[in-house]
Amino acid sequence: MSIGYKEAEATVQSAESLNIKYSVVFQCRYNTPSVFVKQRIDNGRLGRVKCARVILTWCRQDNYYADSDWKGTWDKEGGGVVINQAIHSLDLANWFIGSDPICVQASLHNRNHKSIAVEDTAEGLIKYENGALLSFYTTNNYLIDEQVEIMLLCENGNARLSYNEAEIKYTNGETERSGNHPQMLAKYSSGKEYWGTGHAMQINNFYNSILGRERLEISGRDALKIQRLICDIYKSGNFEGKSI
């Protein structure tokens, strides 16, 4: 939305005052494994998330930053691995937990990209109003883009998911699994090259909301929640781990 919360909030307020549809792309919410887990949290089968973790280990080499004048800068990008790569995984965890953060503690580091000003590694702990805890570790210093791992410890079982698959183990011994369906990938595979099916699915929802056929699923107001969380991670990290 923006590199600052106030600017993002002002944009949302302007859209609302003019009755304009405004949505922010968080395409990973539309991944089949994400929907699968979210449904079981919301219907009570998996129950409330008590504790969660996000691990993202990807690869961004120096030429990734050198090829653009905005990447790796505070004034144009607003940060590094947190705001650019990890934001979608943190959004998923935040969405699953379904509560407001009340305390953010984070550490930011540039361990291997001395040509840029921003962080290439971050870790932290987020405490939520409903008592849930979210731990995260994210870095751009891995050799490959490994599968993101999100782990949820819930009232009635545990869920482990990536962008491609999910597995739920219930306390009663039952197990459920889900993955991205080949027919879905085929349906949304045309056009510009990108990962997964979520972009097209969210864009379809946006169009249909304009036509009055569907409710807008991710509004600007909804997206402000993760915008605030990202900004608080940077505030805490830049103040040497002070709680925000």
Image (tube, grey):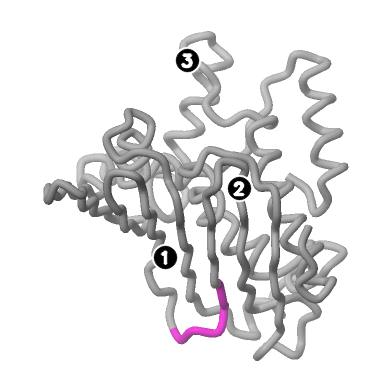
Segment colored magenta: 138-143
Q: Which residue is mark 1?
A: 148
Q: Is residue 77 among the parts visible in the rendering?
A: no
Q: Secondary structure at mark 1?
A: loop
Q: Which residue is mark 2?
A: 128
Percent across and percent down for residue 221 are 69, 30
Distance between mark 2 and mark 3 Cα atoms? 30 Å
Percent across and percent down for residue 60 are 57, 79
User: Of discs 1 and 3, which sits in the foreground?
Assistant: 1
To which quarter of the image does residue 140 belong? bottom right
At horizontal 57% and vertical 39% (from top left) the residue drawn is 99
Does 185 appear above or below 65?
above
The magenta stretch spans residue 15: no
Q: Main secondary structure of the magenta part?
A: loop
Q: Name which residue type carries label 2.
A: Tyr
In-front residue for pair 160/216: 160
- Locate the N terminus by quadrant: top right
Q: Name which residue type carries label 1.
A: Val
The dot on residue 214 is: 3
